[in-house]
Image (cartoon, rainbow, N blue to C red):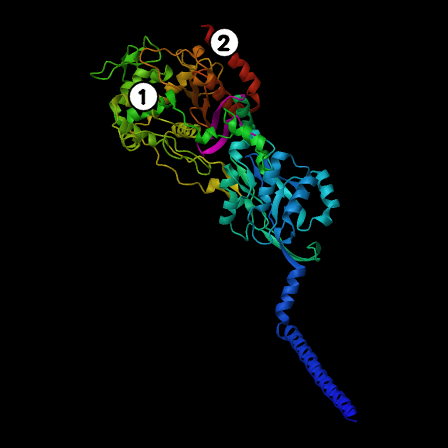
Amino acid sequence: MPQRRDTLKNSEQELRIFRVRTLLAVLVVVTLTGLLVGRLGYLQIVQHEIYTTRSEKNRVRVEPLPPNRGLIYDRNGVLLAENRPTYNLTLVRERVDDLDATLALLVELLELPEEDIEAFNVRSRQRQRPFQPALLMSDLSEAQIARLAINRHRLPGVEVEAQLLRYYPDSNVMAHTLGYVGRINVDELQNLDAGRYAGTHFIGKTGIERFYEEELHGEAGLRKVETNARGRVLRELGRTDPVPGKNITLTIDKSLQTLAYELMDGRRGSIVAIAPATGEILAMVSTPGFDSNQFVTGIDVASYRGLQNDLDLPLFNRSIRGHYPPGSTIKPFLALAGLAGGVITPDSTISDPGYYQLPNDSRRYRNWLRWGHGRVDLERSLAVSNNTYYYTLAHDLGIDNLHERMSGFGFGRRVAYDVQGESTGLMPSREWKRERFNQPWYPGETLSVGIGQGYWQVTPLQLASATATLANRGHWVKPRLALQVGDTSLSENLPDTLDDIQLENDAWWDRVFSGMEKVLSGSEGTARRTGVGLEYRMGGKSGTAQVFSLGQDQRYNADELEERLRDHALFVAFAPVDSPQIAVSVIVENAGGGSTHAAHLARAMTDAWLLKDEAPDADDVREVLEEDTAQVEGN
C-alpha cells in the first residue's frame, strides 16, 4: 500500500513539471513570435522608406555617359583630330568577388604579351571612385571581344563598352602641335571635377589637346538603368544626354605643315611660319616626329623605351622648347637697336680688316671672312653678314641696351597665346649672369651676343615671332594656334600683345629691309643662290649657330667633325617685303651654314604660301639643295 502512494505522487509531480515546461515553452514561442512580428512591423512600417531605397539601389544603377570630344580642324576645314568607334574593357572592382582570379582569366582570354601584363594589372588596381568602371584596355580586337562574350558568365563586374577613341590621321606631321590624349592617371583624377569627368577615361596630355582641354571635353550625361542580381543591364529607365565638346579650328594650314615636315626630310630641327598681320601660326613642325596615336590607348613598353632612347629625341618639341644660339639671324634686329640707340646711322660705315679688338685687349674677334669685307655700311653688313660691324655695334650699345631692346622683340620671354609648354629661351643680361653664376659681365661676352652667340638662346617660335614683328615694322601681334573655338572666333578676341617698337625715323625699317633683300638678291648676298628666280620681294637673313666654341686661331672644318658637332643652319625670312603675308624661321641641326640648307627650305615655304599650286614640291627642293650643296663644296 505505501508503495502505490509513492507511485501516484511521482505521477502527479511529473504532470506538474510537464505543465510548467509546456507553459514556459509556449511563453518562449509567443515571445519570440511577438518579437519577430514586431521586428517585421518595424521594418515594414517604420523603416519602409529606408529599405525601399536600399532595394532600389540594388536593382537600379546610375551610369555616366561621357561626352564626345570636340574635333580639331585646320584653317581650311581639314580634319586633324577625330573620334573613331572602338570597344574598351572596363572593370568595377566592387562587383568582382575575386580580383586576382578575374585578372588572371582576362590575361588568358586577351592573350596579352608578357611585357603588357604588369601594366594591365597596375591599371586594374588604380584608385577609382566607388562603382566607377576602371579602364583596363582600349581598342579591343574582334577576336578578343568574341572570347569575352563567350566567357561573360565567368566575369562579373567586367564589361565591354563601345566608345569613341581619339585618332590623328596625320600623327607624325601634327604630333607636337596637336599633342595627344591619354588615360587619366591617379594624380589627374584627384584634381578633376568628378561630375564633369564621370565615365571619361582620357584627357589631353600635351599640345592643343591639353591647352584647350576644358573646351574640347564637354559635359558628362547620365542614364538610369535596371540591372539583375549580377549587375547586368536589363533596361534603361531614363537619361540625361551628354553635351559634346567644342570643335576647334586651328590657324595651321595642313598642306603647308605637311610641306614643312617633308622639307626637313627626317633631319633634326624645326620650321615655324606665321602670318605677320594676325599672328596666326600657319605651320609649326618639329622633327623627327612620332606617331601620337600610340599614346592614346597606352604605348607598349618597348615602343616607349625606343622613343625615349632615340638620340634624335622625337618626343622633344624643338619648335617651342629647343634652345639655339640665333647666330647672324638676329643682325637685322641689332641693326634696328643700333639705329634706335643712336650708335649708328643708316650710312655709318666701318673698315673691316677681318677682326675686331677691344681696347687694351690683344684678342681678336674674327669675322667669318678672315681677310675682311673692307668698307661696310648697314645694308652691306646684312647682305654679307659681316661680324665686325656687329661686334662694333654691340660694344657701343652695351649689354644692358641690347637686353632691353631685344626683349621688345620677344626674346627671353614666352611669346604665344595658346602654345602649351613654350620655353622662354634666354636673353642674357648683367643681372642674369650675376644671379646665375655670381660673376660680373665681361665686354667680350657682349661681342658674342652681338653675333647671336654666347649665352643668347632662342626657340624657333620666338625667332619666327620676332621676324613677323620685324615684317610688321614693329607692330607686335601675339602668335596663336586657334582660329575658332566653338562659335567664338579668336580673330575678334585677340589677346594682349607686347608694346609696339617705335623708331624715330620710319625710313630705318626700309634700310634694314633693303639689306635683307640683298641677302637673297644682291651680288654678295649670303643666300643669293636661294634667291634665283624669285617672283616676289623677299627679305631674309642667314645664320650659323656654333655647337662648340673655337679658339682664336682655330678654323672650322665640318668634314673633320662628327655630324652632331657641326654647326646648326638657320634662316629667317618674310615676304612679300612690301606687304608681308608670311614670316618663317628655319633651324636644321648640324647642317652647316644657314645660307645653303636652311635658306632653301625657307624659300620653299614662302613659295608654297604665295604661289600656291605653282610652287615646287619637297622633292624639287631637295634636288635644288643637293645641286647647290655640291656646287658650294666644289668651290
Q: The residue under label 1 is which amino acid type?
A: Ser
Q: Residues within 10 Å of mark 1 (few under 14, many from 20)?
A: many
Q: The residue under label 2 is which amino acid type?
A: Ala
Vertical order, 570 against 231 (above or below): above
Indicate the quadrant where residue 428 lies. Answer: top left
Residue 499 or residue 289, whichever sits in front = 289
Q: CA distance from mark 1 to mark 2?
A: 31 Å
Indicate the quadrant where residue 253 lies. Answer: top right
Can residue 127 be found in the magenta stretch? no
Q: Secondary structure at mark 2?
A: helix
On the picture, is 274 further left or further right than 383?
Answer: right
What's the magenta region?
Answer: 265-290
**Labels 1 and 2 touching (C-beta < 8 A):** no
Q: Position of residue 101 (x, y in %)?
A: 66, 46
Q: Can residue 171 be seen at all in this image of the molecule?
A: no
Q: Secondary structure at mark 1?
A: helix
On the picture, is 409 further left or further right than 145?
Answer: left
Q: Residue furthest left?
A: 360
Q: Which residue is mark 2?
A: 630
**Residue located 39% across and 23% down the image:** 326
Q: Residues within 10 Å of mark 2 (few under 14, many from 20)?
A: few
Residue 550 or residue 240, whichever sits in front = 550
**Residue located 46% across and 21% down the image:** 589
Can residue 283 be found in the magenta stretch? yes
Q: Position of residue 565 (x, y in %)?
A: 43, 17
Screen quadrant of the N terminus: bottom right
Q: Which residue is mark 1?
A: 448
Q: Sequence-wise, which precedes: disc 1 or disc 2?
A: 1
Residue 346 or residue 564, whichever sits in front = 564
Q: Position of residue 465 (x, y in %)?
A: 42, 30
Vertical order, 398 against 625 (above or below): below
